[in-house]
Image (cartoon, helix red, strand yellow):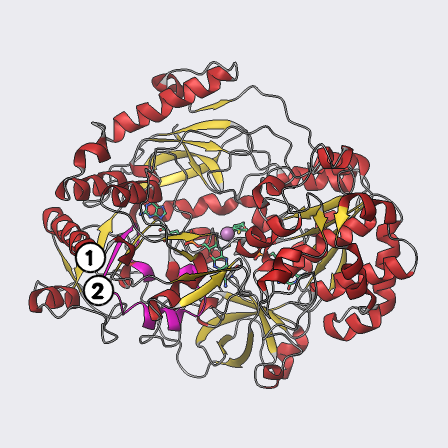
Amino acid sequence: MPVTLTHWGAYDVAVVDGRRIDVRPVTKDPDPSPLGANLAALADHPARVRRPAVRRGFLEEVASGRRGRRSDRRRGDDAFVEVDWETALDLVAAEIDRVRTEAGPASIYAGSYGWASAGRVHNPQTWLFRLLGLVGGFTRTVNSYSYAAAEVILPHVAGNFFDVLGNHTPFEELARHGRLVVAFGGLPAKNTQVENGGTYRHLAPGGLRALRDGGVRIVNVSPLRGDVDRSLSATWLPIRPGTDTALILALANTLVAEGLADRAFLDRYCSGVGPFLRTVADCPPEWAEPICGVPAPTIRELARDLAAGPSLVTASWSLQRADHGEHVYWAVIALAALLGQIGTPGGGFGIGYGSVNRVGSAESRFSLPRIPAGVNPVKGFVPVARITEALERPGAAFTYDGATHHYPDTRLVYWAGGNPFHHHQDLGRLARAWQLPECVVVHEHMWNALARHADVVLPAATLLERDDVGSSPQTGTIVAMPRILEPIGEARTDRAIFSGVAHRLGVGGPFDEGRDDRAWLEWVWAETVDRAARDGVALPDLDGLFAVGAVDLPRPPEPRVLLAPFRDDPDVAPLRTPSGRIELHSEVLAAFGHPDVPAGPCWRPPLEWLGAPLASRFPLHLVSNQPATRLHSQLDVGAASQAGKVAGREALRMHPSDAAARGLAAGDVVRVHNDRGACLAGVVVDDGVVEGVVVLPTGAWYDPVEPGGLCRAGNPNVLTSDRPTSSLAQAPAAQSCLVEVTRWEGPVPELTVDRPPTFVDRP
Ligand SMILES: Nc1nc2c(c(=O)[nH]1)N[C@H]1C(S)=C(S)[C@@H](COP(=O)(O)OP(=O)(O)OC[C@H]3O[C@@H](n4cnc5c(=O)[nH]c(N)nc54)[C@H](O)[C@@H]3O)O[C@H]1N2
Ligand SMILES: Nc1nc2c(c(=O)[nH]1)N[C@H]1C(S)=C(S)[C@@H](COP(=O)(O)OP(=O)(O)OC[C@H]3O[C@@H](n4cnc5c(=O)[nH]c(N)nc54)[C@H](O)[C@@H]3O)O[C@H]1N2
Ligand SMILES: [Mo]
């Protein structure tokens, strides 16, 4: 039976009746993810894009010559005309050519952020960048929605973010040497189902059990009890969202006040200790208590507990997706510095244990070679979550990491493998700004909101419809991903689509280098075999790989302890910070002189939190976390995702007292709203949610009743704000969001995004 690899697991796939599929997790996976059930929807769902299609209004604009920057377009609310591939590719090539000649290549916005699918050959972004690089370039984006604030702050505090991320101490090591793990944002099992690039074995659940079995106590500091699995018997410390930094500073205050801080560690390994201690002196537990809702005696007790033995302080990535999110990790690292255990096997700090499968794994890694994406001659960029502002304000200045840059004059947007109408905040505002460019080209599998907001929609073959190879970055397993189904309708691989455009733009030769899908797969495999041979590992040839399905790289686990070399000798292995030490105060940030960029970790009240003036009108804090039942918005129409819906809408969790105060009961349909927008949701009553907090996971397919209107499906990003974390990182801050919830009266509008849009004949 063929195997395929997804970001959430590897599955044996059986084809039933030619088109339907039946999936089972591979037997080598010790903790398989039930998300496999969503895959069946890829096979033959009515919402699949089957033919190239062009928005009716776009064809009219092209015919009339009424182009330019306009806000009166109907993207997201227009009919489509299905066309043949020749027509569609001619159109796309002509638009790229027109925009790069008339306005310059920087007017092509092709950050194209998103997770796409597992598989090395058919990564759509690679091919997009390769194509556009060959015809003059494009505006790219920097950082990710996952951890943009962390990526920018870490180099000022503890060195390159990815050096830290890739070298976390494994769970097993913590289990042997540790005693206490305090996890801000928990260690949610739901999130460890996933790993970018593919997950072959789910190892994090076993790692978490090892912690428990090793007698390590876990404290779950979170608005949600479920952020640590019940079976791990964690202590739940409920906290108000957006206030962790205040709690952390109060823990630091207690350590210093009670003589529990490790002065020798601070002296040898840190810089900026004096200013930091002055900040901390002003943050006693009594100051933090009314902010975070944790009683002062509990804060003191936790601080003493942390100092009593090997302790790890870790924070999920979600915490930095908030106003001033940069400061959470700074505070976490500073707290760990006071405890003096950074670089030891049972203590220190963590960034994202429990956020994905990989963090905390000891397995050695092997990364497959990448298809060369070429060179992008355009140097300008946009921080990934500033997309709306970039569209709204061409030429406007923005600051990023201390420097001033300018937004491009975007005329053409090209997206393949991501969904901004899932991932971006304040979707109503995005939908308005999205009307302004002259052309939007999208490759999609599904008629989701992104496809509906495009001018040209090109049907992309799914991972089930192409030969590819993928690797699980965590377990060093390489997986053959054979074509299991014929492409649906007229779908083509992303590579083949881009190649068609490249030929029309006169760069088909350098784009293809004489290779088709099969030849590129062979190229990747030949490079892989070479790379493995240099490590002394012999791999089969491509047919051999496809015959066995998956190969494990016989490499031993790599025991590692985060920042151990630095601890051994900070002069020999300094950090990649200006001082080479952990910076508890940054002269570089001080010199930036931006009022919203403090030079040391501190708690600033977010614009939206339960203590904000706005809470009088919108008294509930919305946590829009990652969904347990799918990956982002992918396959929201799938069986696992649909099984989690309440009354056909995304489930909203709320505390019994908040439900009672609004006369709500489990199963009710509600309207969740604030000044930015509104959506429907189905109520789940749960005393494992802090009072005043509601939880609505991301990923329901955006389905507005009218442009910018009520989302019928329950996408929380109609509510979230797209204000940046600060002018330092310009990072997404979805978690700082207040809402109100009221009962939905009257008939519940039917969903429309689970079927294709209206098709009409060519005008
Ligand atoms: N409120 C709120 N918003 C958030 C977050 C949050 O916590 N709260 N989290 C943020 C985070 S961390 C992330 S990473 C983002 C995720 O945002 P995205 O990565 O954009 O979300 P996905 O749903 O994975 O989008 C992938 C899209 O690519 C399509 N696709 C899959 N494979 C292929 C392919 O081979 N070819 C083509 N052409 N298309 C393909 C899928 O159909 C899907 O529409 O969301 C962010 N948004
Ligand atoms: N099943 C599944 N797993 C996924 C993904 C998915 O879409 N589905 N997406 C993957 C991706 S792209 C990423 S980046 C990671 C993201 O990993 P994270 O960012 O860590 O994931 P979240 O689920 O957003 O947040 C984890 C928990 O933090 C808690 N939290 C939120 N705000 C606060 C706060 O202010 N204080 C405290 N103490 N806790 C808070 C929430 O209760 C939430 O459940 O997840 C990955 N894993
Ligand atoms: Mo992410």
Q: Position of residue 691 (x, y in %)?
A: 68, 73
Q: The C terminus lies in which quarter of the figure?
A: bottom left
Seen from the viewer's position, the closer of residues 544 and 165 is 165
Per the image, the residue denoted by label 2 is 438
Disc on res. 497: none
Q: Amino acid at mark 2?
A: Glu
Residue receiving disc 1: 99
Residues packed near mark 1 inside 10 Å, few (<14), some (14 to 19) or many (20 plus): some
Q: Is residue 439 magenta?
A: yes
- Snapshot quadrant of residue 546: top left
Q: Hey, which residue is sitting farthest right in the picture?
A: 259
Mark positioned earlier in the residue sequence (1 or 2)? 1
Which residue is nearer to you in this view: 200 or 687? 200
CB-based contact (under 8 Å), mark 1 and mark 2: yes
> Would you say 38 lies left or right of 574 here?
left
Helix, strand or loop for disc 2: loop
Circle 2 Cα neighbour tier, 10 Å, few/some/many (<14 / 14–19 / ≥20) = many
The magenta segment: 422-450
Q: Position of residue 233 (x, y in %)?
A: 76, 50
